Image (cartoon, grey):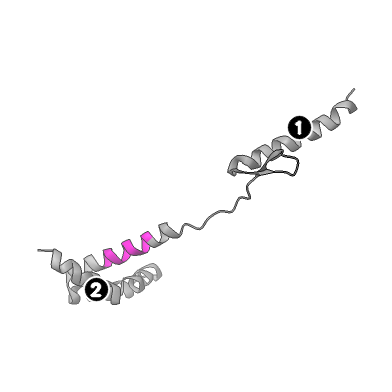
Amino acid sequence: MAQANVPFDKRLKRIVRRHDRMSHGVVKTVTADGLIVARPRAYRPRFPLKGILALVVTGFVFKGFLFASLGDQAYQERVSVLSAGSVMEQAGAWVMQPDVATMYIAEKVKTIMP
């Protein structure tokens, strides 16, 4: 009696495994005989390009705002203090160095700020 259930159990496991893979979506195709077959969509994790781009733009806007509010001399002094610190502070100093984008954003922020 137990051997009669072996093909059923194997088929049931295959169906459950395929159903679990279909949680990422399905692709439906029509075969030559007119049968509609649903197959699991291949799961490919997408790289969050929009999120990283938003983070970079926000960072540049933050740097530009700081540069505009502190002024050139005070900003340079704070970056030099960071560059004399620990490894993490040196990395922060490297990121916070004024660049072309920061200067451009700072000029635009100065026109808005009182």
Q: Is residue 80 magenta?
A: no
Q: Residues within 10 Å of mark 1 (few under 14, many from 20)?
A: few
Q: Which mark is residue 104?
A: 2
Q: Is residue 47 left or right of residue 3?
A: left
Q: Residue at x 39, y 62 (%)?
A: 53
Q: CA distance from mark 1 to mark 2?
A: 63 Å
Vertical placement of residue 44 versus 72, above or below: above
- Residue 60 inside the magenta-drawn segment: yes
Main SS of the magenta part reads helix
Q: Secondary structure at mark 2?
A: helix
Q: Quadrant of residue 101?
A: bottom left
Which amino acid lies under the numbered mark 2 shown in the image of this protein?
Answer: Tyr
Q: Quadrant of residue 55?
A: bottom left
Q: Earlier in the sequence, mark 1 or mark 2?
A: 1
State the residue lying farthest toward the left. Answer: 114
Image coordinates of residue 10 in percent, x first then y, are 80, 35
Q: What SS does tag 1 mark?
A: helix
Magenta extent: 54-63
Looking at the figure, which quarter contains the N terminus? top right
Question: x, y percentage for residue 51?
Answer: 41, 57
Which numbered disc covers residue 12? 1
From the viewer's perspective, is 31 left or right of 69? right
Q: Quadrant of the C terminus?
A: bottom left
Residue drawn at the location 59% of the way across and 43% of the way down: 25
In front: 62, or 84?
62
Image position of 80 (left or right of 46): left
Residue 21 lies, with reference to residue 87, above or below; the image says above
Name which quarter of the figure residue 29 lies in: top right
Under mark 1, the amino acid is Leu
**In the shown orientation, is residue 78 left or right of residue 13?**
left
